[in-house]
Image (cartoon, helix red, strand yellow):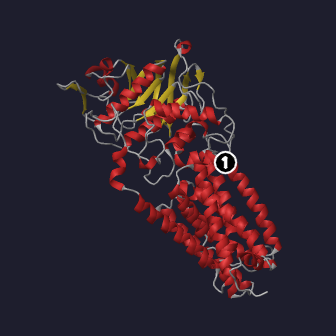
Amino acid sequence: MTDQPTWNLLYDLQLLVHFHFMQNALVVGTLVAVLAGAAGYFVVLRGQSFAAHMLSQVGFPGAAAGVLLHVSPVLGLITFCVIAALGIGSFGSRLEAGHRAESAAVGSILAFSLGLGLLFFRLYAGTAQGVYAFLFGTILGISDRDVAVSLVTTLVALAALAVIARPLIFASVDPDVAEARGVQVRALSVGFLLVLALAIAVTVQIVGTLLVFALLVAPGASALQLTARPMPGLALSIAFSLCFTWFGLAIAYFTIYPIGFFITTFAFASYALIRVAKALLTPRPSRRGWTPIRLGDST
Amino acid sequence: MVRTPGRRVSRESPLTDVASLAARPAVALERAGISLGGNFVWRDVNLSVTTGEFVAILGPNGAGKSTLLKALLGVLPLTEGRISVFGRPVTRGNDEIGYLPQRRRFDPDLRIRAADLVRLGLDGARWGLPLPSWVGIGARSTDSRVSSVIELVGAQDYAGRAIGELSGGEQQRILIAQALVSGARMLLLDEPLDSLDLSNQQAISSLIQQICRERGVTVLLVAHDVNPLLPFLDRVVYVAGGHVLSGRPEDVINTETLTRLYGAPVEVLSTSDGRIVVVGQQEPVSYHAHQDHHL
Protein backbone atom coordinates (compact mmCIF):
# COMPACT_ATOMS: atom_id res chain seq x y z
CA MET A 1 0.00 0.00 0.00
CA THR A 2 1.32 3.43 -0.83
CA ASP A 3 0.17 6.33 1.24
CA GLN A 4 -0.57 8.56 -1.70
CA PRO A 5 -4.19 9.44 -2.42
CA THR A 6 -5.68 8.24 -5.66
CA TRP A 7 -8.88 9.01 -7.54
CA ASN A 8 -10.34 5.83 -6.08
CA LEU A 9 -12.13 7.25 -3.02
CA LEU A 10 -12.85 3.86 -1.49
CA TYR A 11 -9.17 3.00 -1.62
CA ASP A 12 -8.32 6.36 -0.05
CA LEU A 13 -10.74 5.70 2.78
CA GLN A 14 -9.16 2.31 3.36
CA LEU A 15 -5.78 4.02 3.55
CA LEU A 16 -7.14 6.52 6.07
CA VAL A 17 -8.29 3.88 8.53
CA HIS A 18 -5.37 1.51 7.93
CA PHE A 19 -3.18 2.53 10.84
CA HIS A 20 -4.23 2.34 14.46
CA PHE A 21 -3.15 5.90 15.28
CA MET A 22 -5.35 7.12 12.45
CA GLN A 23 -8.34 5.12 13.68
CA ASN A 24 -7.91 6.74 17.08
CA ALA A 25 -7.60 10.17 15.51
CA LEU A 26 -10.76 9.64 13.48
CA VAL A 27 -12.79 8.43 16.47
CA VAL A 28 -11.62 11.25 18.73
CA GLY A 29 -11.94 13.77 15.89
CA THR A 30 -15.56 12.78 15.33
CA LEU A 31 -16.40 12.96 19.03
CA VAL A 32 -14.65 16.31 19.30
CA ALA A 33 -16.44 17.68 16.26
CA VAL A 34 -19.90 16.78 17.54
CA LEU A 35 -19.31 18.14 21.03
CA ALA A 36 -17.46 21.27 19.92
CA GLY A 37 -20.09 22.00 17.27
CA ALA A 38 -22.93 21.68 19.79
CA ALA A 39 -21.21 23.65 22.55
CA GLY A 40 -20.00 26.19 20.00
CA TYR A 41 -23.55 27.07 18.96
CA PHE A 42 -24.20 28.21 22.53
CA VAL A 43 -20.82 29.94 22.82
CA VAL A 44 -21.74 32.16 19.86
CA LEU A 45 -25.38 32.64 20.88
CA ARG A 46 -24.27 33.67 24.39
CA GLY A 47 -21.33 35.77 23.18
CA GLN A 48 -18.93 33.77 25.35
CA SER A 49 -15.92 33.49 23.06
CA PHE A 50 -13.79 35.13 25.72
CA ALA A 51 -14.70 32.48 28.30
CA ALA A 52 -13.87 29.78 25.77
CA HIS A 53 -10.52 31.42 25.15
CA MET A 54 -9.72 31.54 28.88
CA LEU A 55 -10.64 27.89 29.39
CA SER A 56 -8.54 26.68 26.47
CA GLN A 57 -5.43 28.52 27.66
CA VAL A 58 -5.80 27.20 31.18
CA GLY A 59 -6.01 23.73 29.62
CA PHE A 60 -2.42 23.92 28.36
CA PRO A 61 -0.65 23.47 31.74
CA GLY A 62 -3.33 20.88 32.51
CA ALA A 63 -2.24 18.80 29.56
CA ALA A 64 1.40 19.26 30.51
CA ALA A 65 0.67 18.25 34.10
CA GLY A 66 -1.09 15.14 32.82
CA VAL A 67 2.01 14.21 30.80
CA LEU A 68 4.34 15.03 33.71
CA LEU A 69 2.41 12.86 36.17
CA HIS A 70 2.18 10.00 33.67
CA VAL A 71 -1.60 10.10 33.57
CA SER A 72 -3.49 10.88 30.39
CA PRO A 73 -3.05 14.48 29.20
CA VAL A 74 -6.81 14.54 28.58
CA LEU A 75 -7.42 13.94 32.29
CA GLY A 76 -5.08 16.84 33.10
CA LEU A 77 -6.96 19.01 30.62
CA ILE A 78 -10.33 18.09 32.09
CA THR A 79 -9.17 18.78 35.64
CA PHE A 80 -7.71 22.20 34.85
CA CYS A 81 -10.56 23.27 32.59
CA VAL A 82 -13.26 22.26 35.09
CA ILE A 83 -11.50 24.14 37.92
CA ALA A 84 -11.17 27.18 35.66
CA ALA A 85 -14.85 26.95 34.70
CA LEU A 86 -15.89 26.95 38.34
CA GLY A 87 -13.59 29.93 38.92
CA ILE A 88 -15.08 31.89 36.02
CA GLY A 89 -18.59 30.91 37.13
CA SER A 90 -17.99 32.22 40.65
CA PHE A 91 -16.85 35.58 39.29
CA GLY A 92 -20.05 35.91 37.32
CA SER A 93 -21.04 37.53 34.11
CA ARG A 94 -18.68 40.52 34.20
CA LEU A 95 -15.73 38.21 33.71
CA GLU A 96 -17.34 36.22 30.92
CA ALA A 97 -18.15 39.36 29.00
CA GLY A 98 -14.54 40.51 29.25
CA HIS A 99 -14.97 43.74 31.20
CA ARG A 100 -12.01 46.03 31.74
CA ALA A 101 -10.70 45.35 35.25
CA GLU A 102 -11.31 41.64 34.98
CA SER A 103 -9.81 41.33 31.53
CA ALA A 104 -6.54 42.86 32.74
CA ALA A 105 -6.36 40.36 35.60
CA VAL A 106 -7.31 37.52 33.31
CA GLY A 107 -4.62 38.52 30.81
CA SER A 108 -1.90 38.11 33.45
CA ILE A 109 -3.34 34.82 34.65
CA LEU A 110 -3.48 33.42 31.12
CA ALA A 111 0.12 34.35 30.39
CA PHE A 112 1.18 32.74 33.68
CA SER A 113 -0.84 29.69 32.75
CA LEU A 114 1.00 29.23 29.43
CA GLY A 115 4.33 29.76 31.22
CA LEU A 116 3.43 27.13 33.78
CA GLY A 117 2.61 24.68 31.01
CA LEU A 118 6.01 25.36 29.45
CA LEU A 119 7.73 24.62 32.77
CA PHE A 120 5.82 21.35 33.17
CA PHE A 121 6.91 20.20 29.74
CA ARG A 122 10.52 21.14 30.51
CA LEU A 123 10.37 19.24 33.83
CA TYR A 124 9.18 16.20 31.90
CA ALA A 125 12.21 16.73 29.66
CA GLY A 126 9.68 16.57 26.89
CA THR A 127 10.53 17.50 23.36
CA ALA A 128 9.43 20.65 21.64
CA GLN A 129 7.19 18.32 19.66
CA GLY A 130 4.97 17.69 22.71
CA VAL A 131 4.52 21.38 23.44
CA TYR A 132 3.85 22.03 19.78
CA ALA A 133 1.17 19.32 19.66
CA PHE A 134 -0.77 20.78 22.56
CA LEU A 135 -0.55 24.32 21.26
CA PHE A 136 -1.47 23.58 17.66
CA GLY A 137 -2.98 20.08 17.66
CA THR A 138 -1.93 16.83 16.08
CA ILE A 139 -3.31 13.63 14.62
CA LEU A 140 -0.49 11.59 16.08
CA GLY A 141 -0.13 10.06 19.50
CA ILE A 142 -3.75 9.74 20.61
CA SER A 143 -3.65 6.68 22.83
CA ASP A 144 -6.40 4.11 23.36
CA ARG A 145 -6.81 5.52 26.83
CA ASP A 146 -7.35 9.03 25.43
CA VAL A 147 -10.01 7.60 23.14
CA ALA A 148 -11.83 6.02 26.09
CA VAL A 149 -11.63 9.20 28.18
CA SER A 150 -12.81 11.29 25.22
CA LEU A 151 -15.75 8.98 24.58
CA VAL A 152 -17.00 9.15 28.17
CA THR A 153 -16.42 12.89 28.39
CA THR A 154 -18.23 13.57 25.14
CA LEU A 155 -21.23 11.44 26.07
CA VAL A 156 -21.55 13.08 29.49
CA ALA A 157 -21.21 16.59 28.08
CA LEU A 158 -23.67 15.97 25.21
CA ALA A 159 -26.22 14.45 27.55
CA ALA A 160 -25.94 17.43 29.91
CA LEU A 161 -26.27 19.84 26.99
CA ALA A 162 -29.36 18.04 25.65
CA VAL A 163 -31.02 18.36 29.06
CA ILE A 164 -30.29 22.06 29.61
CA ALA A 165 -30.59 23.19 25.97
CA ARG A 166 -33.99 24.92 26.01
CA PRO A 167 -33.72 26.81 29.31
CA LEU A 168 -30.13 27.66 28.34
CA ILE A 169 -31.30 29.24 25.08
CA PHE A 170 -33.97 31.15 27.02
CA ALA A 171 -31.42 32.35 29.59
CA SER A 172 -28.99 33.28 26.81
CA VAL A 173 -31.30 35.42 24.70
CA ASP A 174 -33.63 36.84 27.35
CA PRO A 175 -32.19 36.42 30.88
CA ASP A 176 -34.60 38.77 32.71
CA VAL A 177 -37.75 37.12 31.41
CA ALA A 178 -36.20 33.66 31.84
CA GLU A 179 -35.52 34.42 35.49
CA ALA A 180 -39.06 35.66 36.04
CA ARG A 181 -40.34 32.45 34.42
CA GLY A 182 -38.46 30.34 36.95
CA VAL A 183 -35.25 29.53 35.04
CA GLN A 184 -32.17 29.36 37.28
CA VAL A 185 -30.08 31.67 35.10
CA ARG A 186 -26.91 31.70 37.24
CA ALA A 187 -26.89 27.93 37.82
CA LEU A 188 -27.37 27.33 34.09
CA SER A 189 -24.51 29.66 33.30
CA VAL A 190 -22.14 27.68 35.55
CA GLY A 191 -23.55 24.42 34.18
CA PHE A 192 -22.80 25.52 30.64
CA LEU A 193 -19.26 26.60 31.57
CA LEU A 194 -18.68 23.06 32.87
CA VAL A 195 -19.93 21.57 29.60
CA LEU A 196 -17.69 24.03 27.77
CA ALA A 197 -14.72 22.96 29.91
CA LEU A 198 -15.28 19.32 28.91
CA ALA A 199 -15.70 20.28 25.26
CA ILE A 200 -12.46 22.23 25.27
CA ALA A 201 -10.57 19.48 27.09
CA VAL A 202 -11.32 16.97 24.32
CA THR A 203 -11.08 19.48 21.45
CA VAL A 204 -7.56 20.55 22.39
CA GLN A 205 -6.32 17.04 21.48
CA ILE A 206 -7.08 17.63 17.80
CA VAL A 207 -6.63 21.36 17.22
CA GLY A 208 -4.56 22.42 20.23
CA THR A 209 -4.99 25.18 22.79
CA LEU A 210 -4.40 28.03 20.39
CA LEU A 211 -6.60 26.85 17.53
CA VAL A 212 -9.55 25.67 19.58
CA PHE A 213 -11.76 28.45 18.22
CA ALA A 214 -11.70 26.81 14.79
CA LEU A 215 -14.02 24.12 16.12
CA LEU A 216 -15.58 25.95 19.04
CA VAL A 217 -16.58 29.29 17.52
CA ALA A 218 -16.40 29.15 13.73
CA PRO A 219 -19.02 26.39 13.16
CA GLY A 220 -21.52 28.07 15.50
CA ALA A 221 -20.86 31.47 13.98
CA SER A 222 -21.40 30.12 10.46
CA ALA A 223 -24.55 28.25 11.48
CA LEU A 224 -26.07 31.30 13.16
CA GLN A 225 -25.45 33.33 10.02
CA LEU A 226 -27.54 30.84 8.07
CA THR A 227 -30.48 30.31 10.41
CA ALA A 228 -32.09 31.95 13.42
CA ARG A 229 -33.99 28.77 14.33
CA PRO A 230 -32.50 27.00 17.36
CA MET A 231 -32.54 23.31 16.36
CA PRO A 232 -31.48 23.75 12.72
CA GLY A 233 -28.77 26.10 13.98
CA LEU A 234 -27.48 23.52 16.43
CA ALA A 235 -27.55 20.78 13.77
CA LEU A 236 -25.77 22.97 11.20
CA SER A 237 -23.09 23.90 13.71
CA ILE A 238 -22.37 20.20 14.36
CA ALA A 239 -22.39 19.48 10.61
CA PHE A 240 -19.87 22.27 9.91
CA SER A 241 -17.66 21.08 12.73
CA LEU A 242 -17.73 17.48 11.41
CA CYS A 243 -16.87 18.60 7.88
CA PHE A 244 -13.93 20.73 9.02
CA THR A 245 -12.55 17.92 11.17
CA TRP A 246 -12.98 15.05 8.71
CA PHE A 247 -11.53 16.94 5.75
CA GLY A 248 -8.78 18.32 7.98
CA LEU A 249 -7.85 14.84 9.18
CA ALA A 250 -7.89 13.37 5.69
CA ILE A 251 -5.79 16.08 4.09
CA ALA A 252 -3.37 16.21 7.02
CA TYR A 253 -2.87 12.46 6.67
CA PHE A 254 -1.97 12.62 2.99
CA THR A 255 0.29 15.68 3.28
CA ILE A 256 3.17 16.71 5.46
CA TYR A 257 1.32 19.77 6.75
CA PRO A 258 -0.27 20.05 10.22
CA ILE A 259 -3.97 19.42 10.78
CA GLY A 260 -4.43 22.68 12.68
CA PHE A 261 -3.76 24.62 9.52
CA PHE A 262 -6.36 22.77 7.46
CA ILE A 263 -9.14 22.89 10.07
CA THR A 264 -8.65 26.61 10.72
CA THR A 265 -8.55 27.27 6.99
CA PHE A 266 -11.84 25.45 6.35
CA ALA A 267 -13.41 27.18 9.36
CA PHE A 268 -12.32 30.62 8.27
CA ALA A 269 -13.15 30.07 4.60
CA SER A 270 -16.68 28.84 5.37
CA TYR A 271 -17.42 31.74 7.67
CA ALA A 272 -16.01 34.30 5.24
CA LEU A 273 -17.89 32.77 2.29
CA ILE A 274 -21.19 32.81 4.19
CA ARG A 275 -20.74 36.43 5.27
CA VAL A 276 -19.87 37.53 1.75
CA ALA A 277 -22.71 35.53 0.20
CA LYS A 278 -25.19 36.96 2.71
CA ALA A 279 -24.01 40.50 2.08
CA LEU A 280 -24.42 40.00 -1.68
CA LEU A 281 -27.79 38.27 -1.52
CA THR A 282 -29.48 40.62 0.94
CA PRO A 283 -31.06 43.57 -0.83
CA ARG A 284 -30.47 45.96 2.03
CA PRO A 285 -32.47 49.07 1.26
CA SER A 286 -35.65 47.29 0.23
CA ARG A 287 -35.78 44.91 3.20
CA ARG A 288 -37.77 47.22 5.45
CA GLY A 289 -39.94 48.26 2.59
CA TRP A 290 -41.50 44.83 2.31
CA THR A 291 -43.24 45.15 5.66
CA PRO A 292 -46.78 46.21 4.84
CA ILE A 293 -48.12 49.17 6.75
CA ARG A 294 -51.05 48.27 8.94
CA LEU A 295 -53.60 50.47 10.58
CA GLY A 296 -52.46 51.61 13.98
CA ASP A 297 -48.86 50.68 13.32
CA SER A 298 -47.86 54.06 12.12
CA THR A 299 -49.58 57.21 11.06
CA MET B 1 -27.70 22.94 41.51
CA VAL B 2 -30.18 23.65 38.83
CA ARG B 3 -33.74 23.51 40.07
CA THR B 4 -36.16 21.60 37.91
CA PRO B 5 -38.59 24.07 36.45
CA GLY B 6 -41.03 21.19 36.40
CA ARG B 7 -44.01 23.17 35.28
CA ARG B 8 -46.53 21.81 32.92
CA VAL B 9 -47.62 24.15 30.24
CA SER B 10 -51.12 25.19 31.11
CA ARG B 11 -53.62 23.87 28.63
CA GLU B 12 -55.93 26.84 28.83
CA SER B 13 -55.80 29.30 26.04
CA PRO B 14 -54.78 32.84 26.86
CA LEU B 15 -58.29 33.81 25.91
CA THR B 16 -60.04 32.16 28.84
CA ASP B 17 -63.19 33.59 30.31
CA VAL B 18 -62.27 35.54 33.40
CA ALA B 19 -65.67 36.37 34.79
CA SER B 20 -65.17 33.88 37.61
CA LEU B 21 -62.06 35.75 38.67
CA ALA B 22 -63.55 39.20 38.59
CA ALA B 23 -64.57 39.09 42.23
CA ARG B 24 -61.01 38.57 43.48
CA PRO B 25 -58.58 41.44 43.39
CA ALA B 26 -55.85 40.78 40.84
CA VAL B 27 -53.24 42.38 43.05
CA ALA B 28 -53.38 43.04 46.77
CA LEU B 29 -50.66 44.56 48.93
CA GLU B 30 -51.16 45.02 52.67
CA ARG B 31 -48.76 47.14 54.70
CA ALA B 32 -46.12 45.95 52.28
CA GLY B 33 -42.54 47.17 52.30
CA ILE B 34 -39.26 46.24 50.63
CA SER B 35 -35.85 47.22 51.84
CA LEU B 36 -32.80 46.90 49.64
CA GLY B 37 -29.40 47.32 51.28
CA GLY B 38 -30.96 48.40 54.59
CA ASN B 39 -33.14 51.21 53.21
CA PHE B 40 -36.83 50.89 52.50
CA VAL B 41 -37.63 51.53 48.86
CA TRP B 42 -41.25 51.95 49.93
CA ARG B 43 -43.23 50.73 52.94
CA ASP B 44 -46.72 50.70 54.38
CA VAL B 45 -48.10 50.19 50.91
CA ASN B 46 -51.76 49.21 50.65
CA LEU B 47 -52.82 48.64 47.09
CA SER B 48 -55.55 46.73 45.39
CA VAL B 49 -56.00 46.29 41.65
CA THR B 50 -59.22 44.84 40.26
CA THR B 51 -59.09 42.11 37.65
CA GLY B 52 -59.21 43.54 34.15
CA GLU B 53 -57.97 47.00 35.04
CA PHE B 54 -55.40 48.89 33.00
CA VAL B 55 -53.13 50.59 35.54
CA ALA B 56 -50.11 52.79 34.94
CA ILE B 57 -47.36 52.90 37.56
CA LEU B 58 -45.80 56.35 37.60
CA GLY B 59 -43.20 58.14 39.65
CA PRO B 60 -39.70 59.59 39.57
CA ASN B 61 -36.62 57.53 38.74
CA GLY B 62 -35.48 55.26 41.55
CA ALA B 63 -38.80 55.50 43.42
CA GLY B 64 -39.29 51.74 43.23
CA LYS B 65 -41.63 51.23 40.27
CA SER B 66 -39.69 48.28 38.87
CA THR B 67 -39.24 47.00 42.42
CA LEU B 68 -43.03 46.81 42.71
CA LEU B 69 -43.19 44.65 39.57
CA LYS B 70 -40.38 42.41 40.82
CA ALA B 71 -42.23 41.94 44.10
CA LEU B 72 -45.32 40.83 42.17
CA LEU B 73 -43.17 38.41 40.17
CA GLY B 74 -41.75 36.92 43.36
CA VAL B 75 -38.23 37.81 42.23
CA LEU B 76 -37.77 40.25 45.14
CA PRO B 77 -39.25 39.08 48.47
CA LEU B 78 -41.11 41.57 50.67
CA THR B 79 -39.35 42.73 53.81
CA GLU B 80 -42.66 43.23 55.59
CA GLY B 81 -46.37 42.99 54.92
CA ARG B 82 -48.28 40.79 52.53
CA ILE B 83 -48.64 40.58 48.78
CA SER B 84 -50.90 38.38 46.70
CA VAL B 85 -51.71 37.89 43.03
CA PHE B 86 -55.18 36.56 42.16
CA GLY B 87 -55.69 35.73 45.82
CA ARG B 88 -52.57 33.60 46.17
CA PRO B 89 -49.09 34.35 47.52
CA VAL B 90 -46.63 35.32 44.81
CA THR B 91 -44.37 32.67 43.26
CA ARG B 92 -41.64 32.84 40.69
CA GLY B 93 -42.55 31.31 37.34
CA ASN B 94 -46.28 31.97 37.69
CA ASP B 95 -47.96 31.17 34.36
CA GLU B 96 -50.68 33.71 35.15
CA ILE B 97 -48.23 36.59 34.93
CA GLY B 98 -46.60 37.79 31.75
CA TYR B 99 -43.56 39.99 32.32
CA LEU B 100 -41.83 42.44 30.04
CA PRO B 101 -38.67 43.77 31.70
CA GLN B 102 -37.24 47.23 31.28
CA ARG B 103 -34.63 46.90 28.62
CA ARG B 104 -32.62 48.36 25.91
CA ARG B 105 -33.25 47.08 22.43
CA PHE B 106 -32.17 43.55 21.57
CA ASP B 107 -28.66 43.25 20.19
CA PRO B 108 -28.99 43.62 16.39
CA ASP B 109 -26.83 40.51 15.98
CA LEU B 110 -28.95 38.31 18.23
CA ARG B 111 -29.80 35.41 15.97
CA ILE B 112 -33.05 33.95 17.19
CA ARG B 113 -36.36 34.15 15.38
CA ALA B 114 -39.04 36.33 16.93
CA ALA B 115 -41.45 33.36 16.87
CA ASP B 116 -38.93 31.21 18.77
CA LEU B 117 -38.59 33.95 21.37
CA VAL B 118 -42.36 33.99 21.84
CA ARG B 119 -42.36 30.20 22.14
CA LEU B 120 -39.71 30.33 24.88
CA GLY B 121 -42.20 32.33 26.92
CA LEU B 122 -44.37 29.21 26.89
CA ASP B 123 -41.92 26.31 27.25
CA GLY B 124 -38.52 27.94 27.78
CA ALA B 125 -38.29 26.88 31.41
CA ARG B 126 -38.69 23.18 30.59
CA TRP B 127 -35.66 20.91 30.27
CA GLY B 128 -34.78 19.31 26.97
CA LEU B 129 -34.01 20.21 23.39
CA PRO B 130 -36.07 22.89 21.62
CA LEU B 131 -37.34 20.42 19.04
CA PRO B 132 -39.19 21.82 16.05
CA SER B 133 -42.96 21.58 16.04
CA TRP B 134 -43.18 18.50 13.80
CA VAL B 135 -41.40 16.40 16.44
CA GLY B 136 -42.52 15.90 20.00
CA ILE B 137 -45.79 15.45 21.82
CA GLY B 138 -48.21 18.30 22.26
CA ALA B 139 -46.19 20.39 19.84
CA ARG B 140 -49.24 21.18 17.73
CA SER B 141 -51.09 22.89 20.56
CA THR B 142 -47.92 24.77 21.52
CA ASP B 143 -47.63 25.85 17.91
CA SER B 144 -51.19 27.09 17.65
CA ARG B 145 -50.89 29.05 20.89
CA VAL B 146 -47.73 30.72 19.67
CA SER B 147 -49.28 31.67 16.36
CA SER B 148 -52.50 32.88 17.98
CA VAL B 149 -50.71 35.37 20.26
CA ILE B 150 -48.51 36.50 17.40
CA GLU B 151 -51.67 37.22 15.42
CA LEU B 152 -53.23 38.95 18.43
CA VAL B 153 -50.44 41.52 18.56
CA GLY B 154 -50.37 41.81 14.76
CA ALA B 155 -46.83 40.51 14.35
CA GLN B 156 -47.42 37.70 11.85
CA ASP B 157 -45.59 39.49 9.04
CA TYR B 158 -42.24 39.61 10.80
CA ALA B 159 -42.41 36.75 13.35
CA GLY B 160 -40.16 34.64 11.12
CA ARG B 161 -37.31 37.14 11.21
CA ALA B 162 -34.48 37.37 13.75
CA ILE B 163 -35.50 39.53 16.71
CA GLY B 164 -32.44 41.78 16.39
CA GLU B 165 -33.47 42.85 12.88
CA LEU B 166 -36.85 44.19 14.00
CA SER B 167 -37.68 47.80 14.81
CA GLY B 168 -38.38 48.95 18.37
CA GLY B 169 -42.15 48.86 17.93
CA GLU B 170 -42.03 45.43 16.30
CA GLN B 171 -39.86 44.11 19.14
CA GLN B 172 -42.36 45.44 21.73
CA ARG B 173 -45.23 43.62 20.00
CA ILE B 174 -43.23 40.38 19.98
CA LEU B 175 -42.43 40.83 23.66
CA ILE B 176 -46.08 41.42 24.52
CA ALA B 177 -46.92 38.23 22.65
CA GLN B 178 -44.22 36.42 24.63
CA ALA B 179 -45.64 37.76 27.89
CA LEU B 180 -49.16 36.60 26.93
CA VAL B 181 -48.35 33.17 25.50
CA SER B 182 -48.32 31.21 28.75
CA GLY B 183 -51.99 32.06 29.27
CA ALA B 184 -51.23 35.12 31.38
CA ARG B 185 -54.14 36.95 33.04
CA MET B 186 -51.89 39.72 34.14
CA LEU B 187 -49.26 41.67 32.25
CA LEU B 188 -46.45 43.43 34.11
CA LEU B 189 -44.85 45.78 31.62
CA ASP B 190 -41.78 47.78 32.59
CA GLU B 191 -41.51 50.90 30.43
CA PRO B 192 -42.71 49.26 27.20
CA LEU B 193 -43.18 52.66 25.57
CA ASP B 194 -39.67 53.82 26.24
CA SER B 195 -37.56 54.37 23.14
CA LEU B 196 -40.60 54.25 20.86
CA ASP B 197 -41.66 57.14 18.68
CA LEU B 198 -44.96 58.88 19.40
CA SER B 199 -47.09 56.98 16.88
CA ASN B 200 -45.76 53.64 18.10
CA GLN B 201 -46.36 54.70 21.72
CA GLN B 202 -50.01 55.29 20.86
CA ALA B 203 -50.32 52.10 18.83
CA ILE B 204 -48.83 49.95 21.60
CA SER B 205 -50.96 51.67 24.28
CA SER B 206 -54.06 51.02 22.22
CA LEU B 207 -53.05 47.38 21.65
CA ILE B 208 -52.55 46.90 25.41
CA GLN B 209 -55.94 48.43 26.14
CA GLN B 210 -57.54 46.14 23.55
CA ILE B 211 -55.96 43.07 25.19
CA CYS B 212 -57.11 44.37 28.56
CA ARG B 213 -60.72 44.91 27.45
CA GLU B 214 -61.23 41.93 25.17
CA ARG B 215 -59.36 39.32 27.20
CA GLY B 216 -59.98 40.64 30.70
CA VAL B 217 -56.22 40.76 31.24
CA THR B 218 -55.08 42.94 34.13
CA VAL B 219 -52.28 45.27 33.07
CA LEU B 220 -49.76 47.04 35.29
CA LEU B 221 -47.55 49.22 33.14
CA VAL B 222 -44.60 51.23 34.40
CA ALA B 223 -44.30 54.46 32.46
CA HIS B 224 -42.11 57.49 32.40
CA ASP B 225 -44.64 59.61 30.63
CA VAL B 226 -48.36 59.25 31.31
CA ASN B 227 -49.52 61.31 28.35
CA PRO B 228 -49.60 58.68 25.58
CA LEU B 229 -51.46 56.40 28.00
CA LEU B 230 -54.07 58.86 29.31
CA PRO B 231 -56.83 58.01 26.80
CA PHE B 232 -56.58 54.30 27.63
CA LEU B 233 -55.99 54.10 31.39
CA ASP B 234 -58.35 53.08 34.18
CA ARG B 235 -56.15 54.06 37.05
CA VAL B 236 -52.70 55.30 37.98
CA VAL B 237 -50.45 54.15 40.82
CA TYR B 238 -48.00 56.84 41.81
CA VAL B 239 -44.79 55.79 43.58
CA ALA B 240 -42.75 58.56 45.21
CA GLY B 241 -41.01 59.42 48.46
CA GLY B 242 -41.26 55.85 49.78
CA HIS B 243 -45.05 55.80 49.46
CA VAL B 244 -47.62 54.66 46.95
CA LEU B 245 -50.91 56.30 45.98
CA SER B 246 -53.51 55.08 43.54
CA GLY B 247 -56.64 56.41 41.95
CA ARG B 248 -58.06 57.89 38.77
CA PRO B 249 -55.45 59.90 36.85
CA GLU B 250 -57.11 63.25 37.59
CA ASP B 251 -57.41 62.40 41.31
CA VAL B 252 -53.75 61.52 41.71
CA ILE B 253 -51.88 63.70 39.24
CA ASN B 254 -52.77 67.07 40.72
CA THR B 255 -50.77 69.64 42.61
CA GLU B 256 -52.16 68.93 46.11
CA THR B 257 -51.92 65.13 46.00
CA LEU B 258 -48.45 64.99 44.51
CA THR B 259 -47.13 67.67 46.85
CA ARG B 260 -48.36 65.56 49.75
CA LEU B 261 -46.84 62.41 48.29
CA TYR B 262 -43.46 63.93 47.55
CA GLY B 263 -43.43 65.98 50.74
CA ALA B 264 -42.11 68.80 48.62
CA PRO B 265 -43.72 71.44 46.45
CA VAL B 266 -44.73 69.99 43.10
CA GLU B 267 -46.90 71.64 40.49
CA VAL B 268 -49.10 69.93 37.94
CA LEU B 269 -49.92 71.89 34.81
CA SER B 270 -52.23 71.11 31.93
CA THR B 271 -51.27 72.17 28.46
CA SER B 272 -53.87 73.45 26.03
CA ASP B 273 -53.86 70.14 24.13
CA GLY B 274 -54.71 68.14 27.26
CA ARG B 275 -51.27 66.91 28.19
CA ILE B 276 -50.14 66.87 31.80
CA VAL B 277 -46.82 68.30 32.92
CA VAL B 278 -45.45 67.74 36.41
CA VAL B 279 -42.97 70.34 37.59
CA GLY B 280 -40.97 69.51 40.71
CA GLN B 281 -38.38 71.69 42.39
CA GLN B 282 -36.13 68.92 43.63
CA GLU B 283 -36.98 66.04 41.39
CA PRO B 284 -36.37 66.48 37.71
CA VAL B 285 -39.76 64.94 37.02
CA SER B 286 -41.53 66.19 33.99
CA TYR B 287 -43.80 64.69 31.45
CA HIS B 288 -43.40 65.71 27.89
CA ALA B 289 -45.04 64.18 24.91
CA HIS B 290 -41.69 63.76 23.17
CA GLN B 291 -39.51 62.77 26.02
CA ASP B 292 -36.07 61.34 25.43
CA HIS B 293 -34.96 58.30 27.30
CA HIS B 294 -33.74 59.07 30.82
CA LEU B 295 -31.86 56.50 32.85
In the displayed structure, does residue B203 sit left or right of residue A227? Answer: left
**In the picture shown, does residue A71 fall above or below B2?**
below
Chain letter behind tag 1: A
Residue B192 drawn at (x, y percent) = 40, 36
Q: Locate residue A239, reporting x and y percent.
A: 63, 61
Q: Secondary structure at mark 1?
A: helix
Counting from the top left corner in percent of width and height, residue A36 is at 65, 63
Q: What amino acid type should be assigned to the residue bearing mark 1?
A: Ile
Categorize mark 1 by other alpha carbons within 10 Å: few (<14), some (14-19), many (20+): many
The residue furthest left is: B272
Give the image quarter of residue B221: top left
Quick one: B53 or A213, which is closer to the camera? A213
The residue located at (75%, 78%) in the rendering is A11
Do we see residue B279 in this rendering?
yes
Residue nearest the viewer, comparing B186 with A109: B186
Residue at label 1?
A164
Closer to the camera in the image, B285 or A154: A154
- Up/down of A187 relative to A18, above or below: above
Identify which residue, A205 or B161, lies in the foreground.
B161
**Residue B139 percent location from the top left of the image:** 64, 36
| Left or right, residue B273 beside residue B82 | left
